[in-house]
Amino acid sequence: MANTIDKKWSHLSATLFSDLSEGIFAFGEDLSIIAWNPALVELLQLPPAVMTGATAHDLMSYCALRGDFGPGAPATLADAALGHLRAAHTSFMAWPVAGRTALRIRAKQVGEGVTIAFVAEEDVSGAPRPVPARARVHAGDSRLETFILGQIREGFVVTDVDGIIVNCNPAACEILGVPETELLGLSTFSFLPAGPEKAVVQDTIHSTLNENRTWSDETEIVRPDGSRRVIESSVTPMRGPDGAIIGRIGVMRDVTARWEAEKGVREAETKFRNLVDGSLQGVMIHRDSRIVYVNQSAAQIYGSTTDRMIGRSVLDYCSAEDLKRGQDSMRKTISPAWKLRGRREDGSTVWVEVNAREVDWEGEAARQVTIVDITEKQRAEEALHHAQKLDSLGQLTGGIAHDFNNLLGVISGNLELLREQIDNRGEHASYIEASLRSVRRGAELSKRLLAFARKQPLKPELTDLNELVGSMTTILQRTLGETINVEPRLVNAPWPVLIDPGQMENVLLNLALNARDAMPQGGRLLLETANLSLEHDLVRDPTVIPAGDYLKLTVRDTGTGMAPEVLEKAFEPFFTTKDVGVGSGLGLSMIYGFVQQSAGHIYIDSATGAGTTVHLYLPKAAQSVPSPSRQKVKSSMPAGNNEVVLVVEDDSDLRDLAVLLLNRMGYKTHEAADGQMAIALLDKLPHIDLLFTDLVLPEGIGGVEIAQAARKRFPGLKVLFTSGYGESASFQNVLPPDTTVEMISKPYRREVLAKRLQEVLSS
């Protein structure tokens, strides 16, 4: 991995870095310097040999020993400078040898464990300073190669002095929602929402850059499709030989998901502050734990009245889980603010933040407790933590599913080839069929992993959910048996939703089977739809549902319900309360992933002995969304006619299998193990009819880049992508406008591969 990062940054150093007037060097987590530009050597007056094989610590030590950071112990100054470098968005001053201008060094972390440090002259006089001739940057000279910057999460754009985009990387195109061919020539300011704030942002950026400073902030943008995103961006000026600004480099990162997840926390904190500012805090005074005074706000917090609370023990309003903490706090003269679970009059839990101090009450010592209800704030924080946890699990399971699909593809393909060599009626044939059934079950598990990771391929259609639920009712009733009654309650004129109907049927089936297991003695399963408009965000443990129009689907059973510790882990993959070998623990995680991937929300209400209710909120779709037609796949397995196919796959076993299958189908094949080998082959081959390539490949050159290079060499070339992920839709916006993404998911069966090849070749 380190080798790959070194290659990327070495190439970036030779292209973008070399054109900048600022000194730049990049280093990794082990502090080894992986890239630098000539301006750095000039500004720091370094012998060229110093940088070769050096670390950031070596460089800072060299500068400290030379006196660049002023008087003091060189080791201490070097460590302090290194500490600044390793912290994001920091800067510090340095003075090279006598007679040189002061320098300012600032650093930024850019992903993959890489930090970039920028070194620039600090003009304390205000007079413009000449910069090296290499600082002249034109649109054609600033090249951010897609195969390098495509691996970095941040978007990069290069603009002229007016903010017109002259160069960009794929991440910027994805963030801004515009293909590269359309993004070039647009103004960065065109993405700002219309209004007086737009002019303020423009003026602020201009003035900041003119002062030779970097502008950084979080801003909301409006993409051409009308969707809004929140991006964290920084803009750095580029200056020409005369010191004038000739362009800008912008770095951006989409922080919408984090911003939305934190929105509930911010709103809850705002409500909390309003309570404090408006003197709506609960106040309770107790003597020897007996309440002698309580105000109306405190009584409301605990769901009681002032008359009922006076005379009772303050510990009656502590939950059993936090009772000891409440007792400990009463032994302290002054208790700092802490949060705990309180017990309301009806036995329910309320999260409160309290602090206490000793006071004089009616001539005797007592303790005053101030109380703030933070239940919504706590739920919002838990929702954020829960979303972060599930997102991390999703990344892990998506990677596992990708590798798992490669393994299954090799096993499945070789079993099918072996089946051709033996008597289908013999004993060995039954072994092969049993193995193939296990492969198919493994592929189904992999699909569920991809569903949880929100990377499964979906075919969304404008769907009438009432019609879908109605068609499933008979099937569910037959599946659950006579002891369970399935009751649909469907709203009149339901709002349309944009979902994959096949996956939605799987959701209903999984929820019904879970309900059946929770009702061994029988019961009732309610399926209810409703049109719902939320005027404000709805905080549901552990979910925050933004305001908007939704079609709500409720699935309620009368079963045994879930304990709190089970409910907390319900959506985690592989978590199950069933016996070993009975359940995979992927049912609810698959449902969670599908709902999230469909831009919806889901939460569960459940308690032991009280049944379980699953609430699904699916966004209302626009009426104008067309429903894609379903193409019927022919049942016969077509063969090739000596068409030439270039196969690109980094897994050697899977590549060997694919080549063998294609040769047996009647195709002529060439193969490559990575993107560099494939592009080299393109120049040697006189003709190819189809490119069959994995989307994700090592060394920074993926299937998309290979397809682009191949279409330049062979216009009109047919391309079939394959992947263990299901992310074909995310690659559409980086391909030429006339390119259609044709995709086959791993593991693929021979018959399916044969049909897809013919479909693509004949399209």
Image: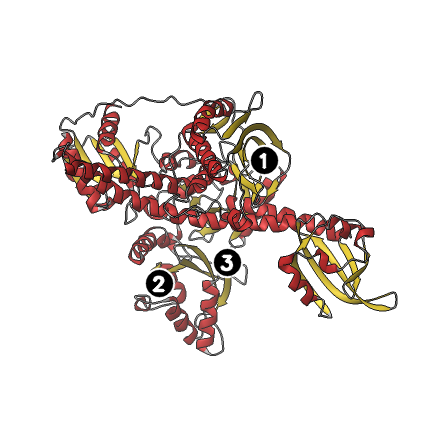
x and y percentages locating residue 218 in the rendered image: 54, 47
Q: Is residue 48 left or right of residue 78?
A: left
Mark 2 is on which residue type? Ile
The residue nearer to you, when weighing 409 against 697, is 409
- Residue 194 numbered mark, or none: 1
Which callout, 3 or 1, points at the residue further toward the start of the chain? 3
In the image, is residue 748 above or below residue 59? above
Residue at image location 55% in from the left, 29% down from the top: 528
Instruction: From the image, tell me which residue sits under label 2.
Output: 33
Marking on residue 357: none
Label 3: state its secondary structure. Answer: loop
Considering depth in this image, is 347 or 286 the residue closer to the camera?
Answer: 347
Q: CA distance from mark 3 to mark 1?
A: 29 Å
Give the alpha-carbon distance from disc 1 to disc 2, as whole Å. Answer: 43 Å
Badge 3 amino acid: His
Where does the image place residue 120, in percent across and percent down from the top left?
A: 45, 60
| In this view, 487 is above or below 661 | above
Asked whether residue 213 is in view, the answer is: yes
The single residue placed furthest to the bottom in the displayed view is 73
Mark 2 → mark 3, Cα distance in angstroms: 19 Å
Image quarter in which the C terminus is found: top left
The residue singled out by tag 3 in the image is 89
